[in-house]
Amino acid sequence: MARYTGPSCKQCRREGCKLFLKGDRCTSGKCSFEARSVAPGQHGAARKKIGEYGMQLREKQKVRRYYGLLEKQFGLYYQLAEKKEGITGENLLILLERRMDNTVYRMGMASSRKEARQLVLHGHFTVNGKKVTIPSLLVKPGDVIAVKESSREKAKIKELAETVEAAVKPKWLDVNAANLTAKVVALPAREDIDFEINEQLIVELYSK
């Protein structure tokens, strides 16, 4: 499946905020967004008036890039959220949080969602004892995510394991840093998402 392979910082500049796509670099002095936060392109620095549709589109693109999804994938998640009971916007964000790659990132076993996606694709994690290679798998309460036994001695996994203890974990995950496991104790809640998102704008965009 095709994915964006260009500069990650360019996406942050386009959305006008940090999307934390490059892990630790985004919180360091090397962050390109800090040095140049204007939109990319020849006229990126020009002041532009954004209409209602433009605001809705930018919010959708921001969330899509934050979670690393393609346009079609994001649309499918919205359709699924719309069919569920409750508030559509919140349903959408909860579905995105439940993705396997996001869960690995949230438990502190990756510096970015992109890295988490790659680790899952390479089969370094299990869910309830079974190897998983699908980043889009939706975890549910009761699931136990763990680093696969045969992967624990790999240099990269050992390096990442050192960051688990210090990582900020959401309430819906019970992380055991010593065993490199995490149990889903509840569904994610809206307040667990610490990134500034106005999901109502996305709902309005898809409702047109």
Image: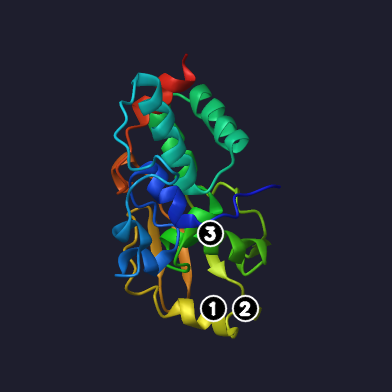
Task: Choose the circle earlier in sequence order: 3 or 1.
Answer: 3
Residue 195: give its label: none
164 up-or-down from 193: above or below = below
Task: Choose the circle earlier in sequence order: 1 or 2.
Answer: 2
Looking at the rendered structure, the kind of residue marked 1 is Ile
Q: Nearer the viewer, residue 128 or 93?
A: 93
Labels 1 & 2 near each other (Cβ < 8 A): yes
To which quarter of the image does residue 111 belong? bottom left
Image coordinates of residue 46 in percent, x first then y, are: 32, 37
Q: CA distance from mark 2 to mark 3?
A: 19 Å
Looking at the rendered structure, the kind of residue marked 3 is Lys
To which quarter of the image does residue 199 belong? top left
- The residue singled out by tag 1 in the image is 157
Nearer the observer: mark 2 or 3; the answer is 3
Question: What scheme was used to colour the molecule?
Answer: rainbow
Label 3 Cα neighbours within 10 Å, binned few <14 / some 14-19 / many ≥20: some
Q: Which residue does the image show at 45% across and 24% down from the upper left?
A: 85
- The residue singled out by tag 2 in the image is 151
Label 2 Cα neighbours within 10 Å, binned few <14 / some 14-19 / many ≥20: some
Q: CA distance from mark 3 to mark 1?
A: 15 Å
- The residue singled out by tag 3 in the image is 114
Residue 149, visible in the rendered structure: yes
Q: Left or right: where does residue 198 sit relative to residue 144?
A: left
Q: Secondary structure at mark 2?
A: helix
Q: Which residue does the image show at 32% across and 73% down from the upper left?
A: 166
Q: Secondary structure at mark 3?
A: helix
Labels 3 & 1 near each other (Cβ < 8 A): no
